[in-house]
């Protein structure tokens, strides 16, 4: 059997009602499993603990929402530039991308938008995959550059040991982050013409969008901590911030949002501030992220299922009149 005949056979099988019904059932099962997983993550923290740990200042939540939406907004802008109108009309796709990447496993979001784009974006699949790869390379370049800068600042201030001594796994994470950054940055700069499929001006715009996202997140992160605990010096927040970026540089770590919250709880003893306030702040950040992930994912999934329902056909005129008379 030739490849073309095999494709025709697969397409014919896929077009059957049984196959389509099975695909819909599997999709629904996957959605339920993901929502259940997110609900478990929130329950692990504890609903009552979440309510009792929430900071009281409204600025914390304003800054938190800015941090949460910075990622999908940046990706929406990037892929709007790369894919055009198809991406600009679907901000919800990049909100889901954030949930997959930060609530599940790193790069699962790229797999999701790749599958979505294969059906929605009017360009060759190979080209679509290449643009996703380009965006990730430029995003990694900006993130790794910032991580190296933060680690250098921490080392220069003599506080690197506060991070590496806090947990047995943190020195390994720091070494991986430094190694990846030291490898990626010179390789991308030297071989950018071979590694990137997009043109130079577009690559610069994509890089600046990612770099702007990181800069906004850094500013909002420090601001959200400072409004809760203004007495803590900036050098202390630098330790927390560096730890966050080190964790985000490690590929395939599960649930980065909760790992970052765990990092904050691990470093409590190094901060000259009330432990309960610090714990509440970091638990609130991790828990709120999971609550938003669950809410958005469930809401978008229900919306999609409602949209896919076939429209209700109107009754014939004579039948309508008959029902009216009755």
Image (cartoon, rainbow, N blue to C red):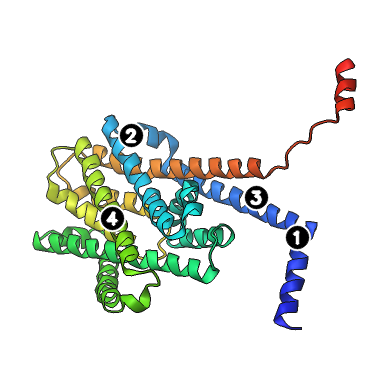
Q: SS at mark 1?
A: helix
Q: Quadrant of the C terminus?
A: top right
Residue under the image location 13 percent in, 51 percent down = 235
Q: Which residue is mark 3?
A: 28
Residue under the image location 33 percent in, 34 percent down = 54
Quick check: 244 left or right of 255?
Answer: left
Q: Earlier in the sequence, mark 1 or mark 2?
A: 1
Question: In the rendered structure, are the residues bearing label 4 and label 1 in contact, judged by CB atoms less than 8 Å apart?
Answer: no
Q: Earlier in the sequence, mark 4 or mark 1?
A: 1
Q: SS at mark 3?
A: helix
The Cα–Cα distance between marks 1 and 3, rounded to whole angstroms, is 14 Å
The Cα–Cα distance between marks 4 and 2, rounded to whole angstroms, is 20 Å
Q: Which residue is mark 1?
A: 19
Q: Residues within 10 Å of mark 3 (few under 14, many from 20)?
A: some
The Cα–Cα distance between marks 1 and 2, rounded to whole angstroms, is 47 Å
Q: Using the rendered view, name the quadrant where residue 309 is placed.
A: top right
Q: Give residue 244's mark.
A: 4
Position above or below: 130 against 231: below
Specify the farthest residue to the bottom: 1
Q: SS at mark 4?
A: helix
Q: Earlier in the sequence, mark 4 or mark 3?
A: 3
Q: Which residue is mark 2?
A: 54
Quick check: 218 left or right of 133?
Answer: left
> x, y (%) of residue 307?
64, 42
Q: Of 226 and 306, which appears nearest the observer?
A: 306
The Cα–Cα distance between marks 4 and 3, rounded to whole angstroms, is 34 Å
The Cα–Cα distance between marks 4 and 1, rounded to whole angstroms, is 44 Å
Question: In the rendered structure, are the residues bearing label 3 and label 2 in contact, judged by CB atoms less than 8 Å apart?
Answer: no
Quick check: 296 left or right of 50?
Answer: right
Q: Residues within 10 Å of mark 4 (few under 14, many from 20)?
A: some
Specify the farthest residue to the left: 157
> x, y (%) of residue 228?
22, 36
């Amino acid at each position: 059997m030739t490849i073309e005949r095999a494709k025709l056979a697969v397409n014919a099988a896929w077009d059957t009602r049984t196959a389509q019904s099975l695909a819909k059932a599997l999709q629904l099962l996957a959605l339920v499993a993901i929502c259940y997983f997110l609900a478990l993550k929130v329950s692990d923290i504890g609903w009552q603990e979440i309510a009792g740990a929430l900071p009281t200042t409204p600025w914390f939540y304003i800054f938190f929402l800015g941090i949460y939406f910075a990622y999908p907004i940046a990706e929406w802008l990037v892929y709007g530039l790369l894919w055009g109108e198809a991406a600009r009309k679907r901000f919800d796709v990049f909100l889901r991308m954030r949930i997959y990447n930060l609530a599940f496993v790193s790069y699962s979001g790229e797999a999701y938008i790749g599958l979505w784009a294969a059906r929605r974006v009017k360009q060759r699949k190979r080209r679509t995959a290449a643009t996703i790869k380009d965006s990730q390379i430029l995003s990694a370049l900006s993130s790794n550059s910032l991580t190296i800068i933060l680690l250098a600042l921490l080392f220069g201030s003599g506080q690197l040991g506060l991070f590496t001594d806090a947990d047995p796994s943190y020195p390994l994470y720091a070494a991986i982050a430094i190694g990846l950054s030291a490898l990626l940055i010179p390789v991308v700069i030297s071989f950018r013409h071979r590694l990137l499929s997009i043109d130079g001006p577009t690559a610069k715009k994509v890089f600046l969008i990612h770099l702007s996202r990181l800069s906004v997140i850094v500013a909002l992160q420090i601001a959200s901590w400072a409004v809760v605990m203004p007495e803590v010096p900036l050098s202390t927040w630098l330790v927390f911030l560096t730890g966050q970026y080190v964790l985000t540089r490690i590929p395939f770590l599960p649930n980065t949002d909760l790992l970052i919250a765990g990092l904050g709880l691990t470093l409590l003893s190094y901060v000259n501030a009330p432990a309960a306030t610090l714990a509440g702040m970091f638990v609130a950040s991790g828990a709120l992220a999971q609550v938003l992930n669950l809410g958005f994912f469930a809401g978008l999934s229900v919306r999609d299922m409602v949209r896919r329902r076939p429209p209700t056909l109107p009754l014939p005129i004579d039948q309508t009149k008959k029902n009216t008379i009755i």
